[in-house]
């Protein structure tokens, strides 16, 4: 299994980002306000983000990812295998 963490500075957001920026703003607000109290709301936002975007590795699209964007910086975690939700 391949996976990784990474942080990147975004030099110039493309115009299409404006359409998903509110999702990232809301996602980050939920995380910063205490995710334990907002898990279901966060999951809904995360599903909208992952349903709208793909994250590509050098080998192609990844199976799962967490992506956060704030103030021109993005950080993410990815896996080439689906995350196990069953805990």
Image (spheres, rainbow, N blue to C red):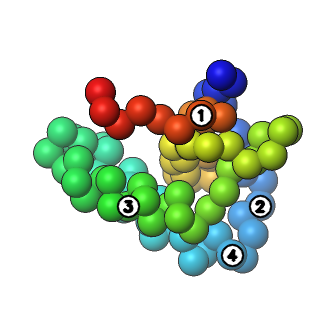
Indicate which disc, 1 or 2, sits on the residue closer to the N terminus.
2
Q: Residue at x 57, y 77 (%)?
A: 19
Total labels: the figure holds: 4
Crowding at mark 1 (Cα within 10 Å: few <14, some 14-19, many 20+)? few
Indicate which disc, 3 or 4, sits on the residue closer to the N terminus.
4
Instruction: Judge depth for marks 4 and 1 and give the one in front.
Output: 1
Residue 14 position, x and y percent, is 75, 69
Spatial CA span between label 3 and label 1: 21 Å
Instruction: Judge depth for marks 1 and 2 and give the one in front.
Output: 1
Position of residue 45 in the picture relative to residue 7 (left or right): left
Q: Residue at x 43, y 59 (%)?
A: 47
Quarter of the image containing the N terminus? top right
- The residue wearing badge 1 is 81
Indicate which disc, 3 or 2, sits on the residue closer to the N terminus.
2
Residue 85 position, x and y percent, is 35, 37
Question: What SS does tag 1 mark?
Answer: loop
Quarter of the image containing the C terminus? top left
Position of residue 46 in the picture relative to residue 80 (left or right): left
- The residue wearing badge 4 is 16
Spatial CA span between label 3 and label 2: 24 Å
């Amino acid at each position: 299994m391949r996976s990784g963490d990474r942080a990147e500075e975004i030099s110039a957001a493309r115009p299409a980002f404006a359409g998903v920026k509110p999702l990232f703003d809301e996602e980050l607000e939920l995380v910063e306000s205490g995710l334990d109290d907002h898990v279901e709301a966060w999951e809904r936002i995360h599903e909208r983000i992952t349903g709208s975007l793909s994250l590509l590795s050098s080998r192609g699209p990844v199976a799962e990812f967490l992506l956060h964007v704030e103030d021109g910086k993005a950080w993410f975690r990815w896996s080439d295998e689906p995350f196990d939700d069953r805990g």
